[in-house]
Image (spheres, rainbow, N blue to C red):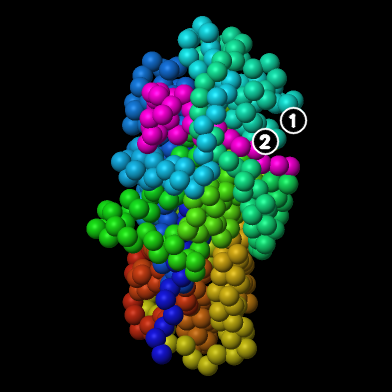
Amino acid sequence: MSAPAPRKILVAVAWPYAQGPLHLGHLAGAYLPPDIFARYQRAIGSDVLMVSGSDVHGTPITVKAEEEGVTPEDIVNRYHPEFLRYWDTLGIAFDLFTTTGTDTHTRVAQGFFLTLLENGYLYRKTVEQFFDEQEGRFLPDRYIDGTCPHCGYEHARGDQCDNCGRTLDPIDLIAPRSKLSGSAPVLRETEHYYWKLSAVQEPLLEWLRTRTGWRPHVVNFAIGMVEDGLHDRSFTRDLEWGIPLPVDDLGPGKSIYVWWEAVMGYFSAPQEWAERRGEPDAWRAWWEDPEAESYYFVGKDNIPFHAVYWPALLLCHGGLNLPTDVPANQYITFGGEKASKSRGIGRSLSWYLERVEPDALRYAVAINLPETNDTDLSDEQMVRRINEELVATWGNLVNRVITMTHRYCDGIVPEPGHEDAADAAMRAVVAAGFHDVGGHLEAVRLRAGLGAAMGVAQAANGYLSEREPWKTAKTDQERTATTLAVALSAVAGCATLLAPYLPFSSEKVLTALGLDGAEGRWELPRLVAGRRLGELGPLFTKLESLDEE
């Protein structure tokens, strides 16, 4: 009987605006979690496609370009390569990290527009839009700010309030003002295509109510938003920096609204990946096979787009898979405030990567992932957890076991003798770890999964303390060899369990144990007795502080 086909897993990762460096909140919210999940899925044999890219048409880019007196392309060309360096340094293993500025994305987004038009979900409408009389131009949503009508936040954007998370239209704002001139904009008529979002309110609500396993804050927010009523939304904007319309009946200077065009990147990136492989139809296995699964990793400010608007777009398009899950994280906060590029809250990833080893940074973030609540994170807390947990528990375990194997067994994996109940219990803890940690990872409970893996390492430290091989080496070589054989197996198991979280150090450990490549398989590696251990220095550096000096 042939083995079942591997699961097709699309790991869809939020597209960052290419207009500034990313900060620690971005890593915790949207970029480390999918990498952990994807690494686990690959290890259990799933066929994973992990995609994302830089959103190059977001109005924050044009705002920054105008502030600096450069072109939007200049801004994109500055920050997109920086993002690629982040992923390389941190081991974020995308199958493709592209941009929304590719020919493929333009073709796919325009095709999506035409399908919606053909299906009757787009219509033309003349509306009033804010116009800056001093600048002589219509204002995109993010060129306008003002007071949120829902929560009173005074720095709400024209498209969304960062304080309460509500999506907005600029006309909703109290006391709106132009970011270009600071003046109060006026309303003028302009014609646009509108999306008949209201037509899919009921099927979307029915679908959301059948979601199981979703994080409560995600599904409850999405259901509440749809129950409040979905209104038709503008699908185009008076902008030339964007994807031009594939029809010319509105005249020049119109683009597909970046809100809708950017999320189409989840559909265009797999097609670009397939084209690069020379298999232009390969993407269909992740998008058209109803058995395929798709997981969207975003921060909670993106819940409306990924749990409401994107599924609604897919329903209007037809023939494409809806999200399996949207495991959106809450916020990492710093001193109680949400990290923000625009407001200068939270240090950049580059700052941390200059001071903290990649796996140590991955650990400090993963053990604090804000999966169900906002999580305040300080540099002092990160240093403490790296030193007291990663270095003292896991790094120390590896160092102790390998050092004692060199000292008492000439650096050779020993053949175990008789194993008693304590030895069997230790092996059982490691074996159970694959079930426990795997269960958490499968359910995208990544923080709990890391805690469970570190629990196995703590148990192994306890086993060593109980067995005291440094004492038995003087009186009972067989007992010492058995203890170290069991401990080495525990180290190999822990390294495999931790590999989705700590890919660089796990690979080093397994290579030193003669188990090259084991980090890519979700099973307890089999140590070969008689094999000489490789060299392995300290896994991690203990940190004093992260001060500037």
Give the SS element for disc 1.
Answer: loop
Position of residue 422 measured from the top left corner of the image (x, y, whole percent):
62, 84
Q: Which residue position holds label 1?
A: 150
- Identity, as a three-letter code, of the amino acid under mark 2: Arg
Q: Is residue 543 above or below residue 391?
A: above
Position of residue 190 measured from the top left corner of the image (x, y, whole percent):
52, 21
Position of residue 64 measured from the top left corner of the image (x, y, whole percent):
45, 22
Residue at the bottom extreme?
Answer: 418
Q: Which residue position holds label 2?
A: 166
Q: Residues within 10 Å of mark 1 (few under 14, many from 20)?
A: some
What residue range appears in magenta?
228-256
Image-quadrant location for residue 403:
bottom left
Q: Is residue 241 magenta?
A: yes
Q: Nearer the viewer, residue 443 or 169?
A: 169
Q: Nearer the viewer, residue 78 or 344?
A: 78
Taking the spot 67% from the left edge, 62% from the top edge, the residue there is 210
Residue 163, label in figure: none
User: CB under 8 Å between callouts 1 and 2?
Assistant: yes
Quick check: can you spot residue 116? yes
Taking the spot 53% from the left edge, 8% from the top edge, the residue there is 133
Q: Along the horizontal axis of the image, is 289 left or right of 171?
A: left
Q: Residues within 10 Å of mark 2 (few under 14, many from 20)?
A: some
Q: Along the horizontal axis of the image, is 292 left or right of 220?
A: left
The majority secondary structure of the magenta stretch comes to loop
Q: Nearer the viewer, residue 270 or 96?
A: 270
Give the SS element for disc 2.
Answer: loop
